[in-house]
Structures are given as structure tokens and as C-alpha cells.
Image (spheres, rainbow, N blue to C red):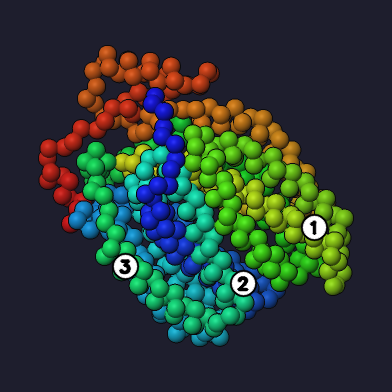
Amino acid sequence: MAAQAAPSLAGEYGNIALLLLLYTLQGIPMGLFGFVNLEVKELFKGSFSEQGTFMLAAWPFSLKLFWAPLVDSWYVEKFGRRKTWMVPAQVCIGVILLYLSSHIDGLFDSKDVWSLTVIFFGLYFLCATQDIAVDGWALTMLRTENAGYASTCNAVGQTVGFTIGFMIPMAKVVSISSFLLFWGIVFLASTAAVALMKTEKPTDPSEEIESLQDAYVSLYRVVRLPSVQKLALHLFTRSLTFMPADVIAPGRLQDAGFPKESLASIKLVVTPLEIFMPWVLAPFTAGERPLRVVVVSYIPRLLLTVFSGVFAYYAGDIQQPTPMLVYAGVCLLVVLQAVASNAMFVAHMAFFAKISDPTIGGTYMTLLNTVHNLGNMWASTFCLKAADYIKTATGIDGFYALCAGCTVYGLVWLLLFRPLLDRLSGLPSLEWRIPSEGGLEAADDDKLTELSAAKLPKGSTGGSARDKTPRPVRADSSKSQKKKS
């Protein structure tokens, strides 16, 4: 296998800037969702039911896998494979923001949670669609050796956008109506500029998909790849050990008397660190083995679960004004959590970009992102429910019990999965490609199998050698036209 060229940003700065813009725009509605979520909780003090209803609006980002093949297979070639979906999605987001600018105050006054839920469900659906398109575009917009920088743009752009969408309305720098009006105009103007001024590369015939049915069949074939199944197992099981520190500890500190405004202020101070961290990590995550960063970050995140429990125990009931030592301890925990979690996130995104098959790049990335998100969702839900259950059933403080139990789980997980991550990092690219159908002589197939086996790390098992065979260019253009306008 030929050595991969060293990453270099020469000639890529314009593409990097565009990806940063697109991911930042994507983060604006997400940050706004966070702000509105707090407002809903403020409207219904003492109740979590309405807040739970509003949280339904965030589901599309974890379900986007179901329409990702549609985004990959239906497009207008003359306009651009990714722009076909990105441009309409962003225009619709801009229109919704303009609508909200004149109606959101009335929705708050009437406590109309269901209308807010429906509107933000639509925003999240559009953001998820834009994310599929941009993820796929990044795979072809950047040169192959720079594919890892796509994850850096994703992490930085979403962080900037979320911070803007969350902190500016919360700080009341401008009214929420003026904020929505401004960003509605920005969405429409920037989308028009991208549509008119940025040209996509023509779709490589070998990367075309015959039909929507073929796209879903390809997705099924991706799921059947042994390498993808092993990676999915890692993604689905990795998060449980982090949840006491990431999800439960902030609420526990608030219950003990630490002001939520102070937590928000600390988060704002940490935001620049979250923005620059991906760039600091880029030389490591853009290289050959980004999963090494995941392994290195795992132990600090595991230790944070221990430290969070110990800190909360010794802090006890927090007096007001907050003691400086307690404030400093919370700052340290938040900073360490931000560094470790950002490192792991960027490493995962870089690895996804590195292994994704460009034929269905958006769908492939979305599949991996979906499993990644579901791994976080089930773990956080389990821990939140388990904390109350443990306390009710045994009388033991559920937070401390989970800190102990999840720490043990994390140690066992690391012993079991570290060898797997090393093997996945060393797999050749053909092990992540969808096998081509037919067109191979048996001898050639055997040679490719031997080549694949020779390149695998000792003790690992190879997938189909058909992955390396290029797909034939179709002579029948009528099939291709079914999916294009």
C-alpha cells in the first residue's frame, strides 16, 4: 500500500474557510435550541415534562441515517451533488428563523411548547440534512491527504455556531427577535453566495449510485462489513464511563448550591479552548492513526469520573458566595472535560473521514455519526434513570454509586477494546470499502485476498478483497438520469 502524502494546507485555505462557515451556520440553530430549552424549563418550574417534550425536537440528528441515502443518490449534476441539498436546506432554515423573529415572543408568552417543538424539529431536520451534504462534500472538496481536517472544521465550526446561538440570547446582548432576524438574513445571503460562487467538482462516474434502492442496499452492505461492525461496537459502548462526570455532575453541583449562572460563565470562558483544541490536535488526528488519540484521551476522561465524585463529596453543601477554592475546582473539572472530550470527538470524526467510501460518503459518515451519537444517548439516559433508581431502591446516593460502577466498567472496557482499536487503525482502506459486485476473475480475487491478509496486523482478520476493485463506468446513461434532474 502506497504511503499517504503528508497533510498540507497549501491551496486549501479557501476550502477550509468555506467548511468552517457551513459548520458554523449549522451550529447556530443548535445553540438557539439550547437557549430555548432553558427558557422552557424557566416557564415550567418544578416540572420536567414540558422540557422532555421539547427535547423531541433534537431527534432528527440521531435519525438522519434514514434519509442520508436519498441525499447521496438524488441530485442535480449541473448544480452540484452536495449543493442540491445544502442550498435548499439552508434557505429553509433562514426562512424559519425570519418567521420565528416575529413570533417567538408570543410563543413564550402563551407557553406553546408543542409549537416550539414542531418548529425546532423542522430546524433540526434541516440542519441534519445540511450536515449530511456538507460531510459528503468535505470528502471531495479537500485533497485526500487533508481529509482529517474536515473533522477539525466540523468541531470548530459547530462550537463557534453553538456558542453564538446559545450565549448571545442568554446574555441578552440583543433581543431574541433581533437575533433571529439577523441570522435569518445571514443564512439567506451566505447560501446565495455559495450557490453562485462555489463550483463543485463533477461527480466521478465510479462514485455514482444507480438508484435510491441501490443507496439503501449500499448502506446495508456497509453495515455488513466486519470492520464497520467492530467499530460500531466500540462507538456504542465507549461512553458509559464518562456519563457521571459529563451529565450528572453539573446537576449535582447545582443541587449543592453552585449557581447555574456561574457554570454558564465557566463554559463561556472554556469555549475558546474548545475552538482551538481541534487545530492543536490536527497534526495527530489528520495522520495515519487518529484512533490513537481516542486511546490516549480515554484514561483522563475515566479519571474525571473519579475526580468528579470525590470533588462533589468533599464540596458538600456549597455556601454563598461560592468559596474560591470550590469555584477553582469546578473550573478545573470543566476545562479538563472540555479538552479530553474534544480530543476524542475530533479523533473519531477524523477517522470517519479517513475510512469513508466516497461512493456514498455522506451516508457512510452519517452511519458512523449515528452510532456515535446513539452511544452517547443511551449511556446518558441510562445513567440519569439509574441514579434515581439506585437511590430509591437502596438508599445509596446514585451519583457516587455510578461514579464507582462506571469507573470499573471503563477499566474493563479499555482492557478489552484497546487491542481492537489498534487493529482497526491498521486496516488497509479496502477493508472499509463496499465490495464491488462481479467482474473479478477467481485468480485476481485470490491475489487481492492474499495482498489484504499480508497487510493486516498480526492476529486480525481481513474482509473481502473485492473492495479494491474499481467500479466499472456504466455505459447506460439512462439509469443515471433517473436520479438527476
Q: Is residue 191 visible?
A: yes
| Quarter assignment of residue 185 | bottom left
**Residue at the location (23% across, 58% down)?**
79
Residue tagged by mark 1?
329
Within-10-Å neighbours for mark 1: few <14, some 14–19, many 20+:
some
Secondary structure under tag 2 reads: helix
Image spot of residue 160 (x, y percent): 53, 63
Q: Is residue 162 above or below residue 350?
A: below
User: Residue at 64% across / 42% down in the picture?
Assistant: 297
* As drawn, 358 above or below 261: above
Q: CA distance from mark 2 to mark 1?
A: 25 Å
Which label sits in the foreground, 2 or 1?
1
Cα separation, mark 2 vs mark 3, equals 34 Å
Q: Report x, y in % for residue 128.
A: 42, 58
Q: Amino acid at mark 1?
A: Gly
The kind of residue tagged 3 is: Ala
Q: Which residue is mark 2?
A: 38
Looking at the rendered image, the quarter that the N terminus falls into is top left
| Residue corresponding to mark 3 | 193
Residue found 38% across the figure and 40% down from its top: 144
Along the line of sight, the residue nearer the viewer: 392 or 418: 418
Mark 1 or mark 3: name the one nearer the start of the chain.
Answer: 3
Q: Is residue 275 left or right of residue 206?
A: right
Within 10 Å of the Cα at label 2, are there few (<14), some (14-19), or many (20+) other Cα atoms? few
Quarter of image, res 39? bottom right
Whether residue 294 sits left or right of residue 214 in the image: it is right
